[in-house]
Amino acid sequence: MDTSQMLKGVLDLAVLAVVGQEDGYGYDIVRRLRHAGLEDVGDASVYGTLRRLFPAGKLTSYVVPSEEGPDRKYYGLNAAGRDQLEESTKAWRSFADTMDGLLGLDRGAAA
Amino acid sequence: MTTTTARSAVAEYLDRVRVALADLDDDVRIELLEDLEQHLTEVAAEGDEDDEPLERRLGPPECYAAVLRVAAGLDDAPPVATSARRARFGAGLWSKVRDSSWYRGLVAFLPELRPGWWVLRGYLVVLVLAGGVGGGSALETFPVPGLVGSPVLDLAAVTGAVVASVALGRRQAAGDLRLLLVLDVVLVPLALVAVPAVGNTAADPYDPSYRYGTPLDLDGGRVSDIYAYDRSGALVRVALYDEHGQPLGGLSGYATGGPSAGQLITSGGAEVSAIPPAVVVVPRRADEPSATATTVRAPAPAP
């Protein structure tokens, strides 16, 4: 199973995490995700996720005028987005631990 | 890479994405693609359009649109609220009907009737224009409505209307001209009225035997019209009945200048129940111009 399958379930969390670190615009967020190691992440997937999280009330947005081209729309986390990031992080942590246990990967566990 | 090349590549890519999402509601699609242009411009700015065109880097716009659709959550099942609402309205029975094979067969067949409606619709428009829905004189020349009185022109009018209606109908089927639905809504009740009316008048109005009632003969000749005059010489509209109480028929009423039998007699607006003996002018034969004055005693009115 390649990472894109696993990524589908956690892309929301990844996007929230990136935006939570620092506000960003569409392509900037794609770049940062890839730079962090998710090289297979699709441009359309990220853009679509942003266009879903925003009407769902998890993101704020504001426009920064630019001289070189269309104005850039920046996304940031609002309070609801921050709550979701926290909850999803806990859920991820719990799920990852469970999988680690299942696969015998948990550190320090008695054999 | 020049900015114009990049801009046109972005515009073209964006257009194809938009087309691939054409099935979405307009406002949903517009909101979804709100900053895609800016996004694609950034992507284009990073690379060289000549070496690596947008399509190669992002994949075909159609695939982009498909992934975008899923990521934006637009392929989800309908919300639970709708299903609950439908269930509340006793949809259980309705969905059983909908799933039954006879209903599905019926619904699948109905589109095949549409071209027939288009033909009928064209004919009906001419019929309405000719004032024929009330079964009036426009239908004398059935089946072609008497729009202008000339058989050739009327037939041309019907043919033209049918052709136009079918052409419009095919465009309706392709999804255009939703306003024509209004025309259909008006014409369907008219069709329900017109078709029986046509059936009633589809006979030779000049054939006396078509009309109910006893034909009236006088001295061996068929009487085609009766004009009644009262004592002061005023023309009176009369209804005449034979001894069986049947209206005297066979009177075409198409002679010029006079009333036709079968009309109720009124005097000052009130129905007259008995007629004193009157002088009646009765043409001897339908084709004889001369007339003979005869005294006729009117019978008692029918029960």
Image (cartoon, rainbow, N blue to C red):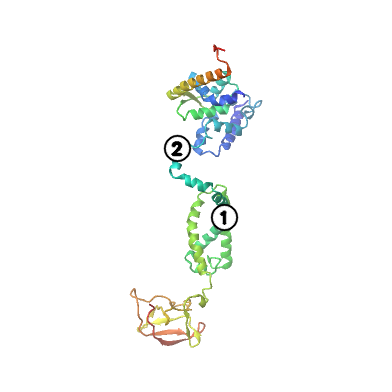
Q: What's the residue type where badge 2 is placed?
A: Ala
Number of numbered discs overlaid on the protein picture:
2
Q: Which residue occupies the foreground of this view, A26 or B99? A: B99
Secondary structure, mark 1, is helix
Determine the residue positioned at 49% across, 24% down. A74
**Are the residues flagged by discs 2 and 1 from a single subunit?**
yes
Q: Which residue occupies the foreground of this view, B268 or B191? A: B191
Q: What's the residue type where badge 1 is placed?
A: Leu
- Mark 1 highlights which residue? B113
Determine the residue positioned at 48% across, 20% down. A90
Tell me the chain of label 1.
B
Q: Which residue occupies the foreground of this view, A44 or B132? A: A44
Secondary structure, mark 2, is helix
Tell me the chain of label 2.
B
Q: How crowded is mark 1: few (under 14 residues within 10 Å), some or many (20 or more)?
A: few
Q: Residues within 10 Å of mark 2 (few under 14, many from 20)?
A: few
Q: Quadrant of residue B41?
A: top right
Relative to B132, say whether B92 is above or below.
above
Residue B141: image location, x then y, percent? 54, 69
CA gap, disc 2 and disc 1: 36 Å
Please identify the residue farthest to the front as the structure is shown: A111
- Mark 2 highlights which residue? B81
Residue B108: image location, x then y, percent? 57, 50
